[in-house]
Structure formats: C-alpha cells, structure tokens
Image: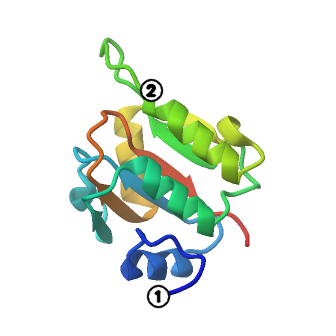
Amino acid sequence: MLKGVPAILPPELLKILCEMGHGDEITIGDANFPGTSLCPRVVRMDGHGVPEILDAILTLIPLDQYVEHPAALMQVVPGDPTETPIWETYKEITARHEARGASCFEEVERFTFYDRVKEKSYAVIMSGETATYANVILKKGVI
C-alpha cells in the first residue's frame, strides 16, 4: 500500500506510468475498444469506468505541456446519432488537474485514432466503460 496513490490503480499500471517518458501516450479504452489487437501491453480494469481511471491517472502524471492537445477523443463517425455526454465529464476531470482544462482535448477520426494507438500507445487500459466513444488517449508531460 502506498500513500497518495489512488487505490483503483493496479501495480501493473503504476509500473507502466513510471516507465513512460515525456511524450509517451497511454490509451484508456471503453468496453468495446479493440485494445488487445492494437497494443501488446494491455492492463485490464473491467470493473471501472473511464472517468474514475482518468481521474486516478491524472492524479499521478501531468499532460504534455508542450503540445496543443495532449489528450485525444475518438470522433463520432459522421451520421452516427450517438451523443457523447461522457466527454464533458472528462473535461471536468481534466480541469481539476490541468490548467488548460477542456482545451487539452482534440477529436480524432475513428480509424486515425486506431492507427495512433497502434503506432504510439505505450499501453492500453481496457475499462468496463459502457458509454460509446468513451476512449481517450493521454500524452504524458514532464514531471
């Protein structure tokens, strides 16, 4: 047990967050995200939603202060009527940890998002989040 570390973060994820360097990316995927097929390093957190995982991670690492958008959301496919109220929750959580708040986020087209995860994500966290388009990529900053 460690003081100040959110209890929902498993030791495997703490190790990954420590190993990551400035500019490395980590993806938090919803329950439908194809994380295992996109990244060899996967942490299962099926009993938790993306908001609580995001909050816990941002307690420990800063977002990259040298890029305009250190966080990315999977853009809704054109013509899909899905609403994404969970994004507002992400922006509120981020604002508690980062001075730039909601401006940290950019929207990335679905297949470009998948390619980015495949090419750049150090790890993927698979959550139990049932909201759709609830995936988020975080770029680690300098501590």
Decide: is 51 above or below 84: below
> In the picture, residue 104 is in which quadrant?
top right
Residue 65's x, y, as percent?
75, 55
User: Quadrant of the image for the C terminus?
Assistant: bottom right
Type of amino acid under label 2: Pro
Counting from the top left corner in percent of width and height, residue 5 is at 54, 75
Q: The disc labelled 1 sits on which kind of residue? A: Met
Left or right, residue 116 beside residue 138: left
Q: Secondary structure at mark 1?
A: loop
Residue at the location (53% across, 63% down)? 57
Mark in front: 2 vs 1: 1
Above/below status of 67 relative to 85: below
Q: In the rendered image, which residue does mark 2 sit on?
A: 85
Quadrant for residue 13, please give it. bottom left
Q: Which residue is mark 1?
A: 1
From where the camera sits, is residue 9 visible? yes
Task: Check the image and name the residue furthest to the bottom.
Answer: 1
Q: Secondary structure at mark 2?
A: loop
| Of 90 and 118, the residue lying toward us | 90
Q: Nearer the viewer, residue 34 or 102?
A: 102
Check residue 15 in the rendering and tell me which mark sits there, or answer none. none
Find the distance from the CA under tag 2 to the CA under tag 1: 34 Å
Q: Nearest the camera: 49 or 105?
A: 49
Decide: few, some or many residues near mark 1? Use Cα within 10 Å; few <14, some 14-19, many ≥20.
few
Towards the viewer: 45 or 6? 6
Q: Residue at x 62, y 46 (%)?
A: 94
